[in-house]
Image (cartoon, coloured by chain):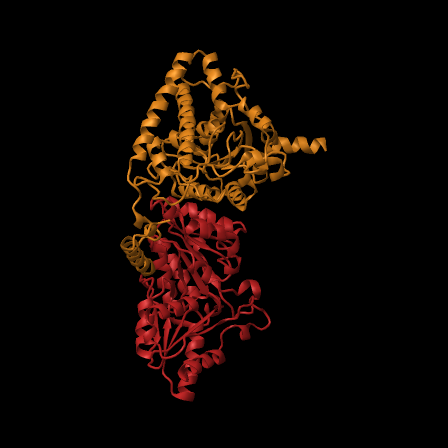
């Protein structure tokens, strides 16, 4: 089995889906001859031509608005937003249309559209190339929001996203685009939407996380095992909405302790929702407070990004707080 | 300067975007060199669509006043544009209307009953009570409009582009108002249309008012049609109260699009005789005199005068047409009023293709709350 990074796995997912289904088209800024600024769409244009790999003008609102029409017609567009930080021009289209056309039309029309985009920090990208805006999409009924953390999952989840009839916001943590490599099957497979991945089994405390923070959580789990002998269980949500509540509850049943780690700002981040969900439905399972480790409630800073983003020290602090409660 | 403007006008067809195309004068007398060759039956059909639209519009206003319809966006005065443009479409073509195109819905085969069921959001509402003033039907190739102004413009372009990619011969026509031309969606759609040349026809219902904002405060552009020229989309201005002018130009645009000629923008100059919606009070921003001036240009009497001038219609036939449709639509309204209410649980339907766990949980909670409501004798208020 070949070893791939996430960019290669995503490229292969797109290529396989475009071969499988002539309705799949790719559109976005620089996705054609440039292959996308991160090369996720590299050389697709050579195989599928300009009709199915569309270099668009520089307009996120236009890309999404046009893709909505294509999806309603029956195509399966995969629209790339070059950086998720630029998606706000398309926000009206996403919230008022992508998410609501099925409902507005009484189920007569659907928008089988994937909007994929590099997200999150850690590459010295600065304020407008580093954000984690998943909460806006999680909060919008009608959307499915996904963020893979491994090449294998990236390929399987993107293929699943292209095949379902609902719109998907597909966020790709760019800091691990090339740093994580693993075996990825060259044949067809999908990773089911709505199912979390158990990254590491443990018995003392559960970390619920996703994206690049999976790796920070693994590092922190090693540190607390070494220093305190605590056994951390790590869950990678993969699908952020609808998140895998069963996986979360099952793990807390065992550990009774919950830490949530994400890069997105703390207030009304997904951690708030999971924390509230556990408080409403399983408070008797908890042996201590639910603690969130998240981006601070500030704009994303360029100079001190490593200090802004959740790091091992902060995850360590959170685990210690819950364990010593 | 003169040379530059001449060159511009020649290369970009700016003269069409600045002038006004009309077939009928205000009295309904045709310019015979421009008069389309249409059969008597077809001309009478156009007139009947106009009559039906006017009566239906009056009924929806009445039903809103009776509390049976949430909000209605009156169509009065704009019938020529919506009907003239929709009649240009072929069976296989699609339409993306805005919320003020009742006549176009009728032309595309939606019945008064479907429209009134929709407006009342009763048990037969095909859109299941999702919003007010929007209408659509997949069977009739009408995509329900989004209420946010102009959102449908890029959708129409993407839809047409998809058809082009799939090699299907369809034309997509979208309506929107003068206000929409200030929004990003107009730019998105026109920019893509100019670049990719999909088979799409844009119809601006320039009814002079975006709620309270007159067109002269909407843009400093000399006309709305010149905006299309800047995107490389051939653009033309028509007298939107002249149904023959709108039909002729729309037909040419549809024919051109269907034969690979790409998009056209039509600015149709009309006037909204009623309020923006039933929640609006136009007396706050425009004078009665202005409205009276435009009432004299009402497209229906104007077309009636044309039909009489051509000997196609007389007073008796005119009375018969109005009477027949008044009776018919009143019967339909009665039937719609007697239909049961929309079931409550549609709230949770059609959010996703399958209901996710959070909605299933909320649906359970909802059912429970209805039971409690009943047992405590509480009412929905």
Q: Is residue B265 visible?
A: no
- Image: B125 above or below A212: above
Q: Residue at x 55, y 67 (%)?
A: A300
Q: Residue furthest front?
A: B377
Q: Quadrant of residue B320?
A: top left
Whether residue B136 is situated above or below residue B364 in the rendered picture: above
Chain B rendering hue: orange
> To which quarter of the image does residue B313 belong?
top left
Task: Work out whether residue A181 or residue B66 is closer to the camera in this orientation and state it.
Answer: B66
- Relative image position of residue B75 (x, y in whole percent): 46, 31
- Observer-nearest residue: A107 or B210? B210
Quadrant the C terminus of chain A occupies: bottom left
| A220 relative to A246, above or below | below
* Picture coordinates of residue B91, whole percent (x, y): 36, 31
Colour applied to chain A: red
Residue A110, image x and y in percent? 36, 48
The quarter of the image holding the N terminus of chain A is bottom left
Q: Residue at x 45, y 62 (%)?
A: A135
Res A106 seen here: yes
The answer to which image quadrant residue B316 occupies is top left
Viewer-nearest residue: B106 or A190: B106
- Could you tell me how many numbered marks the image carries? 0
Q: Residue at x 42, y 21 (%)?
A: B47
Decide: is A280 above or below B275. Answer: below
Q: Position of residue A73 (x, y in %)?
A: 38, 44
B361 to the left or right of A130? left
Between A125 and A94, the one lying in front of the other is: A94
């Amino acid at each position: 089995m070949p070893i791939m990074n996430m960019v290669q796995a995503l490229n292969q997912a797109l290529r396989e889906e475009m071969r499988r289904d002539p309705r799949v088209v790719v559109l976005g800024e620089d996705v054609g001859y440039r292959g996308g600024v991160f090369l996720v769409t590299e050389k697709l244009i050579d195989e599928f031509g300009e009709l199915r790999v569309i270099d668009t003008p520089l307009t996120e609102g236009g890309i999404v608005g046009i893709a909505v029409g294509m999806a309603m017609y029956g195509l399966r567009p995969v629209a790339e937003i070059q950086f998720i930080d630029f998606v706000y021009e398309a926000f009206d289209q996403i919230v008022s249309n992508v998410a609501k056309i099925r409902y507005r039309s009484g189920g007569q029309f659907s928008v089988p559209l994937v909007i994929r985009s590099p997200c999150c920090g850690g590459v010295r990208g600065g304020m407008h190339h580093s954000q984690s805006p998943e909460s806006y999409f999680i909060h919008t009924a009608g959307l499915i929001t996904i963020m893979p953390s491994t090449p294998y999952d990236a390929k399987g989840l993107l293929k699943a996203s292209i095949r379902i009839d609902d719109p998907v916001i597909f966020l790709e943590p760019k800091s691990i685009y090339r740093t994580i490599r693993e075996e990825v099957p060259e044949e067809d497979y999908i990773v089911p939407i709505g199912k979390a991945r158990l990254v590491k089994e443990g018995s003392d405390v559960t970390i619920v996380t996703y994206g690049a923070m999976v790796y920070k959580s693994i590092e922190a789990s090693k540190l607390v095992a070494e220093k305190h002998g605590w056994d951390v269980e790590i869950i990678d949500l993969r699908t952020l909405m609808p998140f895998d509540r069963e996986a979360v509850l099952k793990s807390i049943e065992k550990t009774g302790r919950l830490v949530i780690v994400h890069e997105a700002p703390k207030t009304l981040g997904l951690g708030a929702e999971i924390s509230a969900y556990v408080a409403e439905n399983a408070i008797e399972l908890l042996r201590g407070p639910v603690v969130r480790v998240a981006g601070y409630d500030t704009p994303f800073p360029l100079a001190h990004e490593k200090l802004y983003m959740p790091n091992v020290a902060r995850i360590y602090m959170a685990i210690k707080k819950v364990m010593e409660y | 300067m003169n040379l530059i403007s001449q060159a511009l006008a020649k290369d970009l067809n700016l003269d069409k975007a600045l002038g006004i195309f009309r077939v009928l004068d205000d009295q309904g007398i045709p310019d015979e060199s421009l008069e389309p060759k249409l059969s008597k039956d077809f001309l009478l059909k156009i007139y009947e669509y106009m009559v039906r639209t006017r009566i239906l519009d009056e009924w929806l206003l009445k039903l809103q006043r009776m509390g049976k319809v949430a909000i209605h966006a009156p169509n009065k005065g704009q019938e020529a544009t919506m009907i003239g443009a929709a009649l240009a479409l072929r069976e296989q073509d699609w339409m993306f209307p805005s919320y003020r195109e009742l006549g176009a819905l009728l032309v595309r085969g939606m019945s008064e009953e479907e429209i009134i069921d929709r407006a009342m959001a009763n048990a037969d509402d095909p859109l299941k009570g999702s919003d007010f003033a929007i209408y659509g039907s997949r069977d009739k190739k009408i995509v329900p409009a989004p209420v946010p102004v102009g959102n449908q413009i890029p959708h129409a372009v993407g839809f047409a582009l998809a058809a082009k990619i799939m090699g299907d011969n369809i034309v997509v026509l979208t309506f929107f108002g003068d206000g929409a031309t200030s929004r990003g969606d107009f730019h998105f759609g026109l920019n893509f249309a100019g670049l990719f040349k999909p088979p799409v026809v844009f119809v601006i219902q320039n009814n002079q008012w975006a709620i309270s904002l007159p067109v002269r405060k909407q843009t400093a552009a000399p006309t709305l049609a010149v905006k299309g020229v800047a995107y490389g989309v051939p653009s033309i201005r028509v007298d939107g109260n002249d149904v023959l002018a709108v039909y002729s130009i729309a037909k040419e645009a549809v024919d051109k699009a269907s034969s690979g000629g790409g998009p056209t923008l039509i600015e149709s100059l009309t006037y909204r005789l009623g309020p923006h919606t039933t929640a609006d009070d136009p007396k706050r921003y425009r004078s009665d005199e202005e409205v009276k001036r435009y009432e004299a240009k009402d497209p229906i009497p104007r077309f009636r005068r044309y039909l009489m001038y051509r000997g196609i219609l007389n007073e008796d036939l005119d009375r018969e047409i109005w009477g027949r449709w008044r009776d018919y639509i009143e019967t339909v309204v009665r039937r719609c009023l007697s239909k049961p209410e929309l079931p409550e649980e549609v709230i949770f339907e059609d959010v996703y293709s399958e209901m996710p766990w959070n909605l299933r949980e909320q649906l359970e909670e909802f059912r429970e709350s209805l039971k409690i409501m009943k047992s405590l004798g509480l009412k929905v208020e």
